[in-house]
Image (cartoon, rainbow, N blue to C red):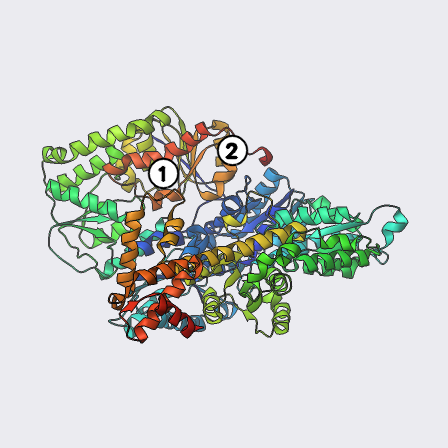
Amino acid sequence: MELTLWTYEGPPHVGAMRIASSMKDLHYLLHAPQGDTYADLLFTMIERRGKRPPVTYTTFQARDLGGDTAELVKKNISEAVERFKPKTLLVGESCTAELIQDQPGALAKGMGFDIPIVNLELPAYSKKENWGASETFYQIVRTLLIEEVSEDSSICAKRWKDLGRRPKVNILGPTLLGFRCRDDVIEIQRILSEQGIDTNVVSPLNSSPDDIKRLIDAEINICLYHEIAETTCEWLKRNFGMEYTTTIPIGIENTINFIKEVHKKLDLPLTNQEELENKSKLPWYSKSVDSNYLTGKRVFIFGDGTHAIAAAKIAKEELGFEVVGLGTYSREMARKVRLVAKDLNLEALITNNYLEVEDAIKKTSPELVLGTQMERHSAKRLGIPCAVISTPMHVQDVPARYSPQMGWEGANVIFDDWVHPLMMGLEEHLIDMFKHDFEFVDGHQSHLGHTAVNTNESKHENIIKEDQPNLKEIIWTDSGKAELTKVPFFVRGKVKSNTEKYAMSKGLSEIDDETLYDAKAFFS
Amino acid sequence: MSKVLFDKETGPREVFCGLTSIVWLHRRMPDAFFLVVGSRTCAHLIQSAAGVMIFAEPRFGTAILEEKDLAGLADAHEELDRVVNDLIARRPEIKTLFLVGSCPSEVIKLDLATVAEKLNKKFLGQVQFLNYSGSGIETTFTQGEDGALKSLIPLMGATDEEKLLVVGTIANNVEDRLKKIFKNIGIKNVESFPPRQSTELPKIGTNTKVLLTQPYLCDTVRDLKHRGCEVIHAPFPLGVEGSTKWILAAADAFKIQELKVHEVIAPLISRARKALENHKEILRGKKLFLLPESQLEISLARFLHNECEMNLVEVGTPYLNKELMEEELNLLPENTKIVEGQHVEKQLDRVRESQPDLVVCGMGLANPLEAEGIHTKWSIEMVFSPIHGIDQAADLAGLFSRPLKRNQILTTKTLATSK
């Protein structure tokens, strides 16, 4: 038994729902009690979907348990098939139904439908959402393609040459409730197309069972999200000899490596490599002098495996940050994340407990947190800027604008998303530092002139009184004040407080211009 | 009773389970913690329904059952004991801990009552333990509150003092308003259940007169009756009409002249009626379809018809307790179609056929209906917003007029890609 106040991942059947809802012409019969229908709102509210997920819940009740829940399952299956006329039916259980062992998958198969039926067994008491999504996708692909497997079904990645056409690839892994999947798919298709490579099928997102059957028309698979598609890619490799890519095209170097990997697998010459360096603004923005202040910024990274690993690489190599913490909630990706962490001389944090993550953030005192929406909240409490890089999804993670993470535009988005909170962070810091400067306070409060000067002045005095009660006796003489105004505003606060500190330590009651210079010499 | 038409429907339902009510219960009693004994689904449900990422450490959580807990019940009890100990050590401010049963804990017959009893002995004087079921195989959405309140009743002391006990969670500011009104009409001793602190339970007895604020408290009412409380029958305090009749019923039970009540509430009523006018302009003559979810549907239908002049197409309700709802049913127009239970697909067919101007439904259904050009109001807002009492009547109407008003403003009425 595990005490959980909040969880990064839902149960495995929610993963199955992500696959089902991503696809067309498919229906999911879920043996589950009524409360489990909450999962619909993940799609209709968070993703703002204008369609209900294609899911029929049997919504059995306590009174059904005494009778025949199997009959209830069959009735619901018949009605769902009749009403929705799916081309493939998924049948599975949620946690409670797993306990009563009606075996809805077997029941469905015995009902004589002429559509493929995918029996999903997703252990609810040991597995989680991403595993459920991966398993579901794999079972669908396996069910729909198993009959195509034969001795001579091996697909040669170079066959496009003999077929006299452009090479074709499948893009596997994007789903609803996946982080920026909607836009990543567009970006990757665009990049492939520029390289003369056609996309055969994108799946699960917006694909149908018919599309799944066409997967073997492509030469290779692009495994876009390992959490979702690796098992499927492996199966396609084992049974059809289809190669798949392992580089995740997030960040400049990995996008280039990804393009190289695709070309190599397809035996397609890469002729525009130099061009690729300039496709995104990230490298130059990162190089430009304005970005100097990014150097060595301490950054803490936590998210799903795919995005956490990618973020670590970008942070270190492409933005010049120092990664001070790295972790993931994806147990399935723990090994890979640990390897990356080891390279960074870190120990990876593998946990599903957000309080442990918050604790780790506190301990490493980073200047920027890259995490999930939960880390955004933790960082806010700790006063650290944060950018969101990973699921679990929040309505904010489905922006109206085009906003991929992958490819060239993804790198642009990442530069802005990660650096802007930091700018804000710097701004906050400056405001804090100069809060005793009434010029600064004026400027910060309003750009509309000085209508409120008096209030600000009195506020300014109050701050001094409240914060430094023992400074009341120290008086700034006219010469001292005059000299202080000559100090550039952005260091004036510091100079002022240092001088006062100095004056106090020397037991002075007045600060004149000379005291200021004495203090300057003392502290330098 | 006016002639309403009753229908029953079974089939796939689209409603929350009783665990959802933890979302408002934990806010009402900040010294209590709600520990669901369930699965990852339960944990995910509550955090999704509540959008709980805003809390640092919420006052609810889930003891997630794992495979080894299913293997042996004895071990599961021990495990729960361990989890509770950790929790109490971490949160010493907790005064009451509710062990909340779920679908899986009910199916494996985890005996939370016995666990609670043991823990009560162990933490005597420090924390009190209670248990109830919020499972979806037994409870719907708001019924969770019924279970929680029922579990508190045995802890309520006895008294012969005459008092009015207002039962059901309402917003704190609304509670203050209602108490002030009761005071002004001459009912001095008014207490609320649940109280604002779980340890400050009101005492009850034969001179306690119970007035319900919410229609979903069947079990609580029954147990209060067993303790000798007298239940005041009234419609629920939604809208001017419901609230007025509700206050009058209480006054009657305390033998207070009707005239005295009217003296106090007449200015409130006229103010509220005036405030309702703007909303009525928008709602008048519009067709309303209520899908079953919060159990407030019948009271809302009565308010929206009688005071906002909407036309009722169908009033869904997850379940119907005719005794508790009698006063409400009497106020409904002739031939109102009430459907108990749900077959969500067939019901949505009827929604599309009848082309209502507004559908009250759960969050899972709202955007898909909007995409088809059917305007909606999600019902979960009804349990989070202060809607009870005469003063809130216009705010309550506003919840329904806003989506219609918004639709008048916006040029895009549907989602082109949805079909």
Point 18% across, 46% down: residue: B179
Q: Residues within 10 Å of mark 2 (few under 14, many from 20)?
A: few
Q: Where is residue B322, by image quadrant?
A: top left
The x, y position of residue A141, in whole percent, is: 70, 53
The residue lying toward the viewer, choosing from B106 and A316, is A316
The residue under label 1 is B297
The x, y position of residue B47, in whole percent, is: 44, 55
| Residue A105 shows up from this direction | yes
Q: Is residue A188 left or right of residue B222?
A: right
Q: Where is residue A370, by image quadrant?
A: bottom right
Point 69% across, 46% down: residue: A209
**Distance of label 1 from label 2 (alpha carbons):** 19 Å
Image height of A157 relative to B255, above or below: below
Disc on res. B349: 2
Disc on res. A429: none
The x, y position of residue B197, in whole percent, is: 25, 58
| Residue A212 shows up from this direction | no
| Number of marks in picture | 2
Image height of A347 relative to A190, above or below: below
The residue lying toward the viewer, choosing from A62 and A514, is A514
The residue lying toward the viewer, choosing from A343 and A116, is A343
Kindly identify the amino acid type of the residue bearing the numbered disc 1.
Glu
Kindly identify the amino acid type of the residue bearing the numbered disc 2.
Asp
Q: Residues within 10 Å of mark 1 (few under 14, many from 20)?
A: many
For marks 1 and 2, the one nearer the N-term is: 1
Point 25% across, 65% down: residue: A472
Discs 1 and 2 carry the same chain letter: yes
The residue lying toward the viewer, choosing from B124 and B8, is B124
Q: Is residue B414 left or right of residue B111?
A: right
> Quick one: SS at disc 1?
helix
> Quick one: SS at disc 2?
helix
Chain letter of the residue carrying label 2: B
